[in-house]
Amino acid sequence: MKRTTDNLIYLDSAATMPIDQKVVSAMTACLNNTEVMGNPSSLNYAGRNAMHDIEIARQKLANLLHTNKDNLTWTSGATESNNLAIIGAARFRSHLGRHIITMATEHKAVLGAFDYLEKEGFEVTRLMPDPSGLLKLADLKEAIKKETQLVSIMHVNNETGVTQDIVKIGSICREKNILFHTDAAQSIGKISLNLDQLPIDLLSISAHKFYGPQGIGALYMRKAAGCGVIPLHYGGEQENWIRPGTLPVHQIIGFGVAAELALERSEDDYLIMQDLHKRLWSGLKSIPGIEINGTIKSKYPGILNVSISGIDGESLILLLEPLCVANGSACNSKNNEPSFVLKALGRSDLQAQSAIRFSFNRNTTYEEIDLTINKYHKAVQYLREIAPDELI
Amino acid sequence: MNKPISKQIEPYNDMTRELFTRGDYKDNSVYPKGRVIKVRKGSLDDGLVAEIVTVVEDEKIVAAKYRIYGCPHSIASLEWICEKIDGLIIHDLSKIDLSNLKNLLLIPIEKTSLILLLEDVLDEIRLQLELK
């Protein structure tokens, strides 16, 4: 049964952002336009028009990233970009060594790719964060071996918002001639990055994390000697043979518009996120036993992840309805196991199990934040009223 | 041909939702006159602690109250059990059957241990009342 509500408050924007109406308009116009209805790989009129619009969208994304559009490959989203970057690059450079490094707090799309490569015979080092969620650069330096050929460390963590210093990490890698990949699904469109000046070789992007459509993403790959990937799919010349398959024109056009809007708005949006984060945490922090997961000092403010002692997360989420929040990463939310990311930060099973991730977007209002604070207080009060004495 | 895999998208039915938030039988530590029997099972490490207090007077359960740490299905289950046993003649406790609770509250298969734990709670109450 599908449930309906008139009072939905959406604070799960790290899972997927509400699509911007300008993006919807552009996509709808594309779908209704017979001039661009062709297969972009076709040489006929409608196909050439479609490819023309795709290249305009690619340029818009390149403008956002401050790079050349030839460095961008369309994919179905960040999961595919991560797989293509990690598996593709590790295989491409396997003659240089078979040791690869990542962090235990990465998104499962990254960890899964590393697990796969491990089964292929690669040696994998999974670095643990410090209790604040940050990578200790000394640990990275220590883990690097002569055979290390790839490091993948995410920019903004999808569960906690903790932001790694990708400039320093990338510089360490470049010094050692090691490829550096970053999963930037949670940061592109929200935090300005100049890829032509940053020591990043491969970067994964997802459109629906910044007001674009679901099902479309991109992989940034620096044009440089030794930086490349072996494709994961075969059977077409699209995207220079790297990612074959018919390009979804309307999604790419929507992605382009989202990138254009992000370039205009991301700095203002960041200030809005700071404001919302401050307001929500100010309203929650007085509750006994509540604490933020991850450092507040190096963090994207669009995400606030809190744990609370003596409260079951699943019950808390149901009491918060119709508020939409997450009790882990969205990809993981049907699994009742405590978040592996929070466990890696040293949280106990109970602390991790009580965690709620609030994530905002530019349409989030003060009124919604205040209602959230009120609902959270009431939910905790109810669950503590029925809890065994030692948990109260 | 393989059977299609059924996917339950909505994990809580209306009955679970209603019992989960009702709280009529939550333990407020105020008990009527009678013999107080307190049974507690589960552990925080397992993510479930269930505690039922029954007050017995003249062979009758004159109050049933609970405290719980757990998921919505477990909270709804305790509300349901206390409602069923409140006011019972103690010999009728054996008639409380949890086998259908799984269907009533749509308790998913991965939470089968919840039913087992609740059966343990009821068994312990019966034991303390020397009904077993």
Image: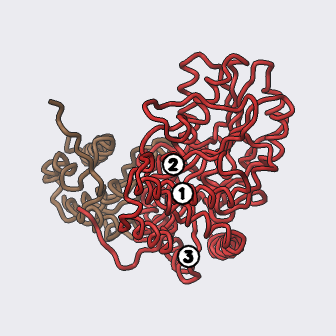
Taking the spot 59% from the left edge, 57% from the top edge, the residue there is A307
Taking the spot 55% from the left edge, 76% from the top edge, the residue there is A363
Residue contact at pointers 2 and 1, CB within 8 angstroms: yes
Q: Nearer the viewer, residue A348 or A279?
A: A279
Where is residue A207? Give x, y as percent. Answer: 54, 57
Q: Nearer the viewer, residue A41 or A139?
A: A41
Rendered image: mark on residue A77: 2
Q: Quadrant of residue A318?
A: bottom left
Taking the spot 16% from the left edge, 51% from the top edge, the residue there is B96
**Which residue is outermost to the front?**
A44
Q: CA distance from mark 2 to mark 1?
A: 7 Å
For residue A44, side relative to residue A295 (left or right): left
Q: Amino acid at mark 2?
A: Gly
Q: Amino acid at mark 1?
A: Ala
Residue position marked by numbered label 3 in the rendering: A364
Chain at tag 3: A
Colour chain A is painted in: red
Taking the spot 20% from the left edge, 60% from the top edge, the residue there is B84
Residue contact at pointers 3 and 1, CB within 8 angstroms: no
Q: CA distance from mark 3 to mark 1?
A: 19 Å
Element at label 2: loop
Chain at tag 2: A
Chain at tag 1: A
Q: Residues within 10 Å of mark 2 (few under 14, many from 20)?
A: many
Q: Quadrant of residue A62?
A: bottom right
Residue position marked by numbered label 1 in the rendering: A207
Where is residue A283? Give x, y as percent. Answer: 63, 76
Q: Amino acid at mark 3?
A: Thr
Colour chain B is painted in: brown
Rendered image: mark on residue A138: none
